[in-house]
Image (tube, rainbow, N blue to C red):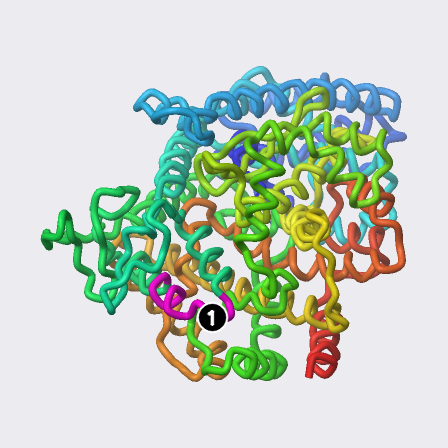
């Protein structure tokens, strides 16, 4: 997963607006008359300047001008004195601003990285002061400062924003520099008070700590036969490690899988005893939900909906910003601004996939391969992967020998990239900008925001070395780091650094992750390997699209019920999870009213992030198809240096096609026939 913590620093800047430009953000004190007078004054001063650029700039700056910034005459004077009315002035201004923003964003990102190090990395006990620093956003007041000193207004006046629809229509013909100007115009589109930013940073950090320490001591679990099924020292983080352990037990570990799923149900429904969370001192019987210490049953007090309180807290912190943004819900900001895909379009695409007849046929094939009826946890069926036929202990033995600690993995990064086709010099260049750290949680990739700084691969490494599960996740995070490095260092304009949205970095992360066995020297021998890879992607997409659909519907419900408490939210989430299951999964699985889709920790700690994975699968497939006939290293370097364009334009330039679900569905039907 790519960390979204940089987003906390600059969320106030990057809130693109799709509303009509005539509509001012709440707080503006500039009248229509004053706007028109200012526009006419600038037209007279700069007759050769495009009238539309003057009008856009004045209206954009006016929408952000509050009473404390001055009166209407002050606004007019400011615009006359600050407008860059010819190309040379505008070019020079852009270059100055771009340089200064890289300095600001880069160093604030670095400060957040360092302040959160104690809670993210596996070093010592987390103290109260660590949590306080982790919740502190050093960039929270940056926006206020830049409005107070009028820099924000200089940007808004000279680099007005374009709506998402305008970017789609006009951007096809823009030069790279024009695109960079447009992204400069996205920097100041909402004016959110610093105290709201700081509050969200605090709540987000608290939630991140909660999730990163939600460990289940699997060695203390007892099944319905009174048997301990897992090694005594096995610790599984929810939901990531629980899911991955479940995956690793195909095809013959169904009793372990059922026990893990029972644990998941308790987490979702919040009947999990508080005592057994991140605590090795108690044995737990999930089927009976009993807790035992030294052979004696003790009280099993449930967690009491803490999981859902964290989600409520995040909702209120983000909703408090709504009134200050033209995109007046977090849902709109997440999709139309950050993802640059309208939420209804996302939901429609996901439902189209979830309704496909292909899924019932693939489910039938899986049931046949398992020799039993499907069960809810089979949304994570892993039997199409090459590794499903390989003993995981064998793979973990290899990874532990290779990576005893984070330093060993960091040292091996050039070799990994060379195995993927990079020349030695280029592999070393990219690797030199990536640092590997031991993660306290499941891990993440944290990118640099300034050239000259590194990106960070945080991954979970037990004391006896990296096991295969950790290695598989680490390859995913490495894909993020490679994208972060290329899309920062190899993009021609800093304002174009990055990718269109997180789905694109997830796509490369998936591409790296799927090559994990290749990188271990374990070669694929199955002649049906290509067909199985497609079916595996189909099944993964089936799982994550349902989870993403739930995530979106939960946020819609929160906006419809803004005063809901944690218990009401829990009941709603479980109900919606069952409804989605009954609509799109029960016809395939043959069982109804299952809440499994609600187990994802992302939904609690990373609001509305899950859709990026689903889109990432679609984008991954299209890139993988392109890679079949193109050099891996050259292609990755080329497409991830395209920078932050709109999603469809990026895809057109990358692989010559728009983002589309149909190629994946078509390939799925073909793969199904070959697999049969």
Pick the front one: 99 or 601: 601
Tell me residue 259's x, y (percent): 33, 64
Tell me residue 232's x, y (percent): 33, 48
Give yes or no for residue 254 being in the magenta stretch.
yes
Q: Quadrant of residue 621?
A: bottom right
Q: Quadrant of residue 617?
A: bottom right
Categorize mark 1 by other alpha carbons within 10 Å: few (<14), some (14-19), many (20+).
Answer: few
Q: Is residue 148 above or below residue 589?
A: above
Pick the front one: 542 or 153: 542
Residue 52: tell me if it is visible. no
Q: For the residue labelled by badge 1, is the local secondary structure a helix, a strand or a loop?
A: loop
Residue 488: tell me if it is visible. yes
Assign the magenta stretch its main secondary structure.
helix
Q: Is residue 497 left or right of residue 134?
A: right
| Residue bounds of the magenta highlight | 250-260
Please tell me how many numbered marks the rendered image carries: 1
Q: Is residue 490 left or right of residue 292?
A: right
Pick the front one: 178 or 29: 178
Can you identify the residue that label 1 sits on? 252
Pick the quarter of the image with the C terminus. Answer: bottom right
The residue located at (35%, 40%) in the rendering is 210
The residue located at (52%, 81%) in the rendering is 367
Tell me residue 315's x, y (percent): 38, 46
Give yes or no for residue 428 being in the magenta stretch.
no
The residue located at (44%, 72%) in the rendering is 580
Q: Is residue 140 above or below residue 315?
A: above
The residue located at (41%, 44%) in the rendering is 319
Q: Is residue 178 left or right of residue 18?
A: right
Tell me residue 70's x, y (percent): 53, 20
Pick the quarter of the image with the N terminus. Answer: top right
């Amino acid at each position: 997963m790519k960390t979204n913590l940089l987003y906390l620093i600059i969320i106030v800047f990057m809130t693109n607006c799709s509303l009509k430009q005539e509509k001012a953000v709440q707080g503006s004190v500039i009248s229509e008359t004053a706007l028109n007078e200012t526009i006419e004054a600038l037209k007279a001063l700069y007759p050769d300047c495009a009238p539309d650029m003057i009008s856009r700039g004045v209206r954009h700056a006016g929408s952000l001008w509050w009473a404390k910034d001055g009166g209407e005459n002050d606004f007019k004077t400011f615009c006359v004195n600050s407008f860059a009315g010819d190309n040379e002035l505008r070019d020079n201004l852009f270059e100055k601003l771009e340089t200064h923003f890289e300095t600001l964003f880069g160093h604030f990102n670095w400060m957040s990285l360092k302040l959160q190090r104690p809670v993210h990395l596996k070093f010592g006990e987390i103290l109260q002061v660590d949590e306080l620093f982790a919740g502190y956003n050093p960039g929270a007041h940056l926006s206020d400062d830049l409005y107070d000193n009028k820099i924000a207004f200089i940007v808004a006046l000279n680099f007005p924003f374009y709506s998402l629809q305008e970017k789609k229509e006009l951007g096809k013909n823009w030069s790279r520099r024009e695109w960079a100007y447009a992204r400069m115009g996205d920097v100041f589109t909402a004016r959110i008070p610093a105290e709201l930013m700081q509050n969200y940073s605090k709540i987000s950090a608290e939630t991140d700590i909660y999730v990163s320490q939600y460990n289940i001591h699997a060695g203390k679990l007892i099944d319905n036969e009174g048997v301990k099924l897992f090694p005594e020292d096995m610790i599984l983080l929810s939901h990531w490690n629980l899911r991955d352990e479940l995956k690793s037990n195909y095809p013959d570990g169904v009793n372990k899988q059922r026990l893990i799923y029972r644990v998941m149900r308790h987490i979702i429904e919040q009947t999990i005893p508080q005592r057994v969370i991140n605590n090795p001192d108690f044995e737990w019987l999930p089927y009976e939900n009993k807790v035992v210490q030294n052979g004696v049953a003790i009280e099993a007090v449930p967690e009491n909906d803490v999981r859902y309180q964290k989600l409520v807290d995040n909702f209120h912190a983000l909703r408090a910003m709504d009134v200050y943004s033209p995109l007046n819900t977090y849902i709109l900001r997440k999709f139309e601004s950050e993802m640059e895909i309208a939420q209804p379009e996302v939901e429609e695409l996901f439902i189209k996939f979830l309704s496909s007849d292909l899924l019932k046929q693939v489910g039938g094939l899986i049931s046949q391969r398992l020799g039993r009826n499907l069960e809810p946890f089979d949304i994570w069926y892993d039997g199409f992967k090459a590794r499903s036929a390989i003993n995981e202990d064998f793979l973990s033995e290899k990874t532990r020998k290779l990576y005893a600690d984070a330093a060993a993995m960091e040292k091996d990064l050039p070799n990994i990239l060379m195995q993927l086709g990079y020349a030695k010099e280029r592999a070393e260049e990219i690797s030199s900008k990536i640092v590997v750290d031991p993660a306290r949680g499941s891990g993440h990739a944290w990118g640099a925001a300034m050239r000259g700084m590194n990106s960070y691969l945080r991954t979970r490494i037990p004391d006896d070395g990296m096991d295969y599960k950790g290695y598989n996740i680490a390859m995913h995070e490495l894909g993020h780091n490679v994208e972060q490095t290329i899309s920062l260092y190899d993009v021609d304009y800093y304002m174009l650094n990055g990718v269109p949205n997180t789905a694109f970095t997830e796509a490369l992360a998936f591409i790296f992750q799927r090559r994990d066995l290749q990188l271990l020297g374990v070669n694929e021998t199955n002649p049906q390997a290509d067909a199985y890879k497609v079916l595996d992607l189909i099944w993964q997409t089936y799982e994550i699209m349902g989870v993403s659909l739930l995530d979106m519907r939960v946020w819609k419900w929160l906006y419809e019920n803004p005063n809901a408490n944690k218990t009401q939210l829990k009941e709603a989430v479980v109900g919606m999870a069952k409804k989605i299951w009954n609509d799109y999964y029960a016809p395939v699985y043959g069982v109804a009213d299952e809440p499994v889709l609600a187990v994802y920790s992302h939904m609690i700690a990373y609001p509305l992030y899950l859709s990026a994975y689903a889109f990432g699968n679609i984008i991954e497939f299209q890139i993988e198809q392109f890679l079949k006939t193109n050099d891996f290293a050259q292609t990755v370097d080329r497409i991830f240096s395209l920078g932050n364009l709109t999603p469809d334009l990026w895809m057109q330039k990358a692989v010559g096609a728009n983002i589309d679900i149909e190629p994946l569905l078509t390939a799925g039907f073909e793969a199904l026939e070959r697999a049969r």
